[in-house]
Amino acid sequence: MKKFPLLIAFIVLLGIVSPLFAEGSSPVLDSALQEYFKVGKLLSDDTLKGVPQAATTLMDIVQKNTPSFFPETLLAKVKLLVEAKDLDSARLAFKDVSDILIETLRTKKIKTGKYFVLTCPMAQASWIQPDKEVRNPYYGSAMLLCGDVTAEF
């Protein structure tokens, strides 16, 4: 019987402490991801038009918040996205940006329930979306629906 109150105390303590390890979203992350989502949508629509502008805004956000929030490796990858001259180079840069952002979400233990990681086995690449409706930025209209939700943040 003496173990029961200890078990209850442990469960209560666990309930109080565990949320401290899972962060919610932050305004910095939300604003960066909004620009990232614009790029993903444009690439899924097979267009480069608008990508440099959204990527430039993303680069400004990343630059202002590195290394305090974003890893230093992200800035160079976003710069490649800004400078992309064709869909293929933009998609390659987007893959690298996606990988770093996904790892940032994992490392910071972000738990919002509003960001979804989708993975395309054909492209061997993942990306983040604000919903579960697949819009593949790596193949666009050729394979727009190729991908599955593989994680949620």
Image (cartoon, rainbow, N blue to C red):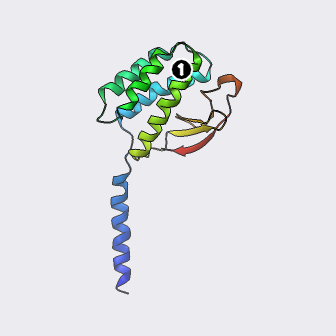
The three-letter code of the residue at mark 1 reads Ala
Query: In the picture, residue 132 is in which quadrant?
Result: top right
User: Horizontally, is 51 left or right of 119 in the view?
Assistant: left
Residue 110 in view, yes or no = no
Q: Which residue has dot 1 on it? A: 90
**Above or below: residue 99 compared with residue 112:** above
Residue 18 in view, yes or no = yes
**Above or below: residue 18 compared with residue 85:** below
Residue 60, image x, y percentages = 35, 21
Q: Local crowd at mark 1 within 10 Å, few (<14), some, or many (≥20)?
A: many
31 or 39: which is nearer to us? 39
**Above or below: residue 86 compared with residue 127:** above
Residue 53, image x, y percentages = 45, 15
**Above or below: residue 8 compared with residue 43:** below
Residue 80, image x, y percentages = 45, 20
For the N terminus, the quadrant is bottom left
